[in-house]
Amino acid sequence: MSTWLIDSLGTTDALAEVFSDASVIRAMVDFEIALARAAARAGAIPPGAADTIERAVDAGSLDARAIAREARRSGTPSVPLVQALIEQVRAVDPESASRVHWGATSQDVTDSALVLLLKRAHVLLACDHARIDRALRELSNAHAGSVMLGRTLLQPATPITFGLKAAGWKAAISRSWRRLSEAWGQALVVQFGGAAGTRAAVGESGAAVASALATELGLAPAAPWHTDRDRPGAVIAGCGLYAAALGKAARDISLLMQGEVGEVSEPGGGSSAMPQKRNPSGCAIAIAAATRLPGLVSAFLAGMIQEHERSVGGGHAEWPIVSTAVQATGASAAAMAGVVEGLEVHPERMRRNLEATYGTVFAERAVMMLALPLGREAANELVKRAVRQSRETGRAFGETLAAIPEASRAVPAQDLREVDRPGQYLGEAESLRKQLLEE
Amino acid sequence: MSTWLIDSLGTTDALAEVFSDASVIRAMVDFEIALARAAARAGAIPPGAADTIERAVDAGSLDARAIAREARRSGTPSVPLVQALIEQVRAVDPESASRVHWGATSQDVTDSALVLLLKRAHVLLACDHARIDRALRELSNAHAGSVMLGRTLLQPATPITFGLKAAGWKAAISRSWRRLSEAWGQALVVQFGGAAGTRAAVGESGAAVASALATELGLAPAAPWHTDRDRPGAVIAGCGLYAAALGKAARDISLLMQGEVGEVSEPGGGSSAMPQKRNPSGCAIAIAAATRLPGLVSAFLAGMIQEHERSVGGGHAEWPIVSTAVQATGASAAAMAGVVEGLEVHPERMRRNLEATYGTVFAERAVMMLALPLGREAANELVKRAVRQSRETGRAFGETLAAIPEASRAVPAQDLREVDRPGQYLGEAESLRKQLLEE
Amino acid sequence: MSTWLIDSLGTTDALAEVFSDASVIRAMVDFEIALARAAARAGAIPPGAADTIERAVDAGSLDARAIAREARRSGTPSVPLVQALIEQVRAVDPESASRVHWGATSQDVTDSALVLLLKRAHVLLACDHARIDRALRELSNAHAGSVMLGRTLLQPATPITFGLKAAGWKAAISRSWRRLSEAWGQALVVQFGGAAGTRAAVGESGAAVASALATELGLAPAAPWHTDRDRPGAVIAGCGLYAAALGKAARDISLLMQGEVGEVSEPGGGSSAMPQKRNPSGCAIAIAAATRLPGLVSAFLAGMIQEHERSVGGGHAEWPIVSTAVQATGASAAAMAGVVEGLEVHPERMRRNLEATYGTVFAERAVMMLALPLGREAANELVKRAVRQSRETGRAFGETLAAIPEASRAVPAQDLREVDRPGQYLGEAESLRKQLLEE
Amino acid sequence: MSTWLIDSLGTTDALAEVFSDASVIRAMVDFEIALARAAARAGAIPPGAADTIERAVDAGSLDARAIAREARRSGTPSVPLVQALIEQVRAVDPESASRVHWGATSQDVTDSALVLLLKRAHVLLACDHARIDRALRELSNAHAGSVMLGRTLLQPATPITFGLKAAGWKAAISRSWRRLSEAWGQALVVQFGGAAGTRAAVGESGAAVASALATELGLAPAAPWHTDRDRPGAVIAGCGLYAAALGKAARDISLLMQGEVGEVSEPGGGSSAMPQKRNPSGCAIAIAAATRLPGLVSAFLAGMIQEHERSVGGGHAEWPIVSTAVQATGASAAAMAGVVEGLEVHPERMRRNLEATYGTVFAERAVMMLALPLGREAANELVKRAVRQSRETGRAFGETLAAIPEASRAVPAQDLREVDRPGQYLGEAESLRKQLLEE
């Protein structure tokens, strides 16, 4: 178990509600009611029994903690829950009580309930993703011309624009969302197979009950998948990839927020002890999620090696993995939606950080200029010398280079002087930015 | 590093060749040649230079071990490899030497090379997958009528057919392959971004070079993705899901092969010390792969939180993860292709194992029969009594039940006697089998 | 979050209480009270302030859910909790309110609180471990003479005793517990460093406050370890190893419980649909834990790469990982304690399973006998022939072998006939058993 | 498989040699020779046979690739290797050939060989750890007085010293090494159990052979541990913790090396495209290792749930996991030894970065000063105002605060003016530093 405080950064209120005890019970009871209605529709049980069951069961009066305790004995919460429902129905009509859970097995209930919860969770994540998508597009457009340092291995590199950077985040996040969303859609299938997956207990009407049940629950029909867990597995793996894409953006933002860099600020984020601070609190939530997801994905994958028609342990491990993975991913999306919607960008500071390199980040460009007339090695040596001088003297790299006779003999001094103009060395930043936004 | 012996069960000869030193060097050199040709085609370097480069470079004479040693200093094998190529070209034509690696950055080489290797590996996996797919379909069809115990939590449950079981394996493996294959297709994109991902060093012709380069290499074009690793990430996650689906089948087969079960036999599999044994050696390879993949997937995901335009460490971790994950998955597919193609199935033993339960696995069925007239609880009690008696006496469960007066008063004795006929309690096994094969 | 139902199989009531909201709040409040008392003792704040704080704060009236919601803004539950405590104290005495959280930083509270919870959890796990340890020792002693099949790669191998098998489980579980317990002991250290880990805010009295605080809380003193997470990391890794050792025993037991094997039975474990079943429900909990732990260990390790004096994300991921890992491990221990204490062992069935191999598991022994006179290859061929005949005819392997003239010419027929007596081929089973129990 | 180039950053030359094919073969052959000698010493085989075996076998002539290919059939390289050795001995003396591998099972060879390799690897890691340990101690002592910004959540916090920071790295790395080293020592045990772990094939002399074998190999004796993998598991988990401690230091160093921070420089580290750059290449290797290890640890743990006396798959997964984990950890240690031995530290830049905050990092200190006279809330408000003014005006925080009348009425202006003197706000930095070094 992990409660509000233990996992405060790994969920949202709305997602916590989806996976709450009340909501889990509701989903399991919804399955049993839908099953009764479906069985009645298919003629497997009398219509009156379905009505009675629907009227008699009362999700609200069930005790989650007691069910959980019993679940440890039988290996599944279905056994005590179904027992409780049978008792509720028996109090009204003993005959109908025999029709509860008709032809189903424990895992039909737990799997279908989980799918129902996943369906609700998807909507919540989709909303936050849409916010991220929109905000990143706007950030990118607004800062198409905000020139900043590219940074490779955390070292200053040739310039990019913040618009390109934001477009890169957006593209990776959107691709990952599309993958996740597709997997999610494929996973919204009903589980109904009975004891060993043949629906034998419902006799002739198995297919009809299964189909009606899917309709009742608003899920797609499917052959039983008790020990074939690729569909939820693809959702969890997709969460891992999506959380990683969010985590990458969060890492970048937290780095840009460093006091010494100061190029963006996350909205909010105070400190308990230090009033001067503005912490990347939203990014921390996203990075925490990206830290947890890989392990959750691996645990789900490891549990997929399930024995025969029902596993010993593999399947028993899934509920908390799925619920934690989805909530942490959703917490990340919600946090990052807030971060990118409110992100303050400081183009002036970007410019100053670039200038603070004295233009030495254009060394690559200078090598490209000088390599043809002088050969690559000589060009390299010359440029390194200019970099050194520029750093020692604080004089602009272009000026420094132009003042070296070997250089100005090979390339017009005017060209050398302008080697460190960022605006002239952005390559395809703008067209790539647009391409990434359109993807 | 892991050599032939250390990883003998985690690769195949063909896949080991794809990721061998010679093959990696070849792919990196192919990138450099293709880049020169593309740059020439786009007018960025003289056509003659491209020709010279292509003629002068000699992948075969490069020393992988020396490059690897140098790579530790610069953080990438690209630096020493490019240096070696420049020297090869310089020996022929110093001016052309300046055009080697024109406008590219180290990661352009390593990423594109990795994608080239992935492209080759995909073909190898596809072949083995096709073998598995075909063999499982045939097994399923051949054993549509081979009735066997369903088994839940490793306990005997109501009967299924081996045809249904094999169809279930096939469906999960095929769904997983489709996902993996789609991700793989999307990952076959070129990497070309230059120092900070703007292609600034090639000036105006960046897009033209990038496009020509993709064509030369037979890859799709893409905006630079130096620190956006979702595409290869989706491949690795897809390998994890696919290996898990194979691992589930392998686990089932190894369980069915147990001496006490004996329902199938893997071809081959001798023991060093015990001549009587026939080991599930192919299954062991598949389960070993399914054991390793989750950790590899998690490592890749963890490494995706990459800083800015080039990461410190995250990207540096990828090559061995990708190569190991793909090889282990391929080893699993190759092993399982052999296993299912040669699998011996023993329907007679399946029947005997079913009979050895005295029909008590039909207890569920008996409860369903008796629940209506007697109520669920009473039915349950009666059935438990019959199960106990049947086990103690070795008398058939149906007979035992029919001999209990409370039971035969509620349901005709003849129906009770036939409660343990497997053929009459297969539900939709056959139609579900067909549905799974058609998916 | 994961609630009672979502994680019913991954905790116990007692462990769930340790990590409940009420308990977390209590631990954080205990830290603040202890800090005030320690600061007063060290002369850093007036004694009266400590008394007032202790009297004024009321853990019971704090709203965990509201604190959790605020925590998302500041990145830690400490900020809103401390704020709430300050308000409680201010209502009584504004001056003392200024002394709450004196010199501490948010992470001092959260880390110390986590350690306090770990301390309580350790006692709970130790009790269940002691039960397992005792029960396995008794099982091993009781079945020192219960001969059974050894099984390698799930195939019948030469015989062992159940006493040896149980001793093997016990030895691995005990070694793992000792490692875990040692790591746990080392992790019970206080956290007190202030904003950047120098305790600067408490001036001269830092060391005195830290030492008194440790004493108040019953923890060992330590230099601040805000971003050095090896101590809790070793606990989580130790949980992973311990849960794996339990999982191995659970896997074995679930395999021995198979209908076709039937050598042991777990107490309890009914099925919702099938009254004849006796499920390995306790084993399922242990295997589920062993499935989840590796991913949790990897997530903790991945989060250990924490930046400078306080991390962005790595540390924020820890609480739910630690709490889930400890609870799942504890659930496994509790379940396995129940399993091994109540395990029914069926030596008669073990004997029958051994006999059902017709003695062919002694093929290795026969090869050893025949290899010297005949050479290894000829011996192998002869033995394989006898195995085949024995399986076809159902005649005992020893008899079969003795009837082959090449064999009885090389080795006295009487020796060959006795080659399949299990009691004579147990090697050092008994002395190894004792050695494993004494370890 | 992963070859030189694929895994160039994840090994060292010396470790790659330890796990090379030649070395693995050597270790397996050493086991067989030692076994023959031990069996002869114990009287289980004639002394002459041992001599013949030792003389006849020729590790150098074995073909690793061919053995690997065969291993896929039998599930282990032992079967083809032993077969090859038997043939080598048979060519000399057929009778002695029957004594090769006497009483052993395949896993006795592979496990003992792995332990022999681990023993060699430990020495290599210990050397690099000693270098790290020494260099960090020296760095810490040399920079006991180098005041720098503490940084929490990547934001400037109150000051620390670089000496304290280095001591923190050293303490965590050393604690982790001690744990790892202890686990490593416990894992250096021989494996010798025969087919099912009872040593039955060697009859009476099992214990004597086992003991002599351990002595021959320089390993500790142990009861067979074929499916009890906690000892190597503890080594791999220990590698994970150790690599994480190294990774934390590497992350810090790479952050301090950022262009905008510039407080330390790693020796070496050039770029292929950008001559001005100095990359954290060593840190990249360490962070890459810390990225990979968690997944490797989880894979090993997942594989520990091994069936009965020999597993299907779990054990088959181990060799590449262990070899990769140890090599990556060793590569990290080697890289970080180079980094910290050659680290350039720039105290002047540290001072400038601190000054660039205008003293606002002392806000906490100011709050502590003002909280008593004014109450915490008012103090907080005042300090926030001063921080704002200081940032806008560029005037020192102390001066700014002293100029606010509410503040200077509450606390002497002189004290306020000195609030931003770093040297006066280091708390116990120096004593904690010493304590951490002495641990």
Image: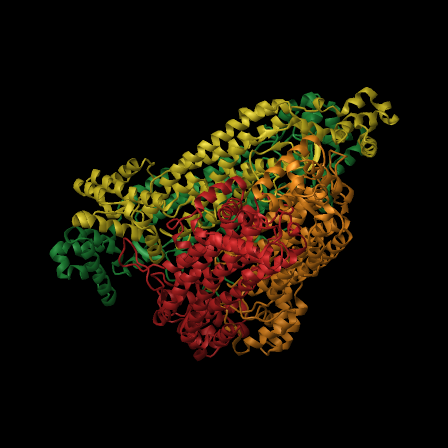
Chain colours: A yellow, B green, C red, D orange
Single out the residue that lies furthest toward the left. Answer: B409
Please state the total of marks drawn on the protein image: 0
Nearer to me, A150 or D367: D367
Relative to D308, residue A192 above or below: above
Q: Quadrant of residue A273?
A: top right
Q: Quadrant of residue B33?
A: top right
Q: Residue at x 60, y 25 (%)?
A: A433
Nearer to me, D225 or C312: C312
The answer to whether any part of residue A325 appears in the image is no
Q: Position of residue D349 (x, y in %)?
A: 76, 41
The answer to whether any part of residue C92 appears in the image is yes
Q: Position of residue C410 (x, y in %)?
A: 50, 76
Q: On the picture, is C19 further left or further right than A278?
A: left
Q: Residue at x 75, y 32 (%)?
A: A357
Single out the residue that lies furthest toward the front. Answer: D409
Relative to C328, residue B74 above or below: above
Q: Position of residue D12 (x, y in %)?
A: 70, 52
Q: Residue at x 87, y 23 (%)?
A: A409
Q: Position of residue B154 (x, y in %)?
A: 36, 57
Q: Residue at x 58, y 75 (%)?
A: D209
Q: Quadrant of residue A115?
A: top left
Relative to C158, residue D176 above or below: above
Q: On the picture, is B19 further left or further right than A40?
A: right
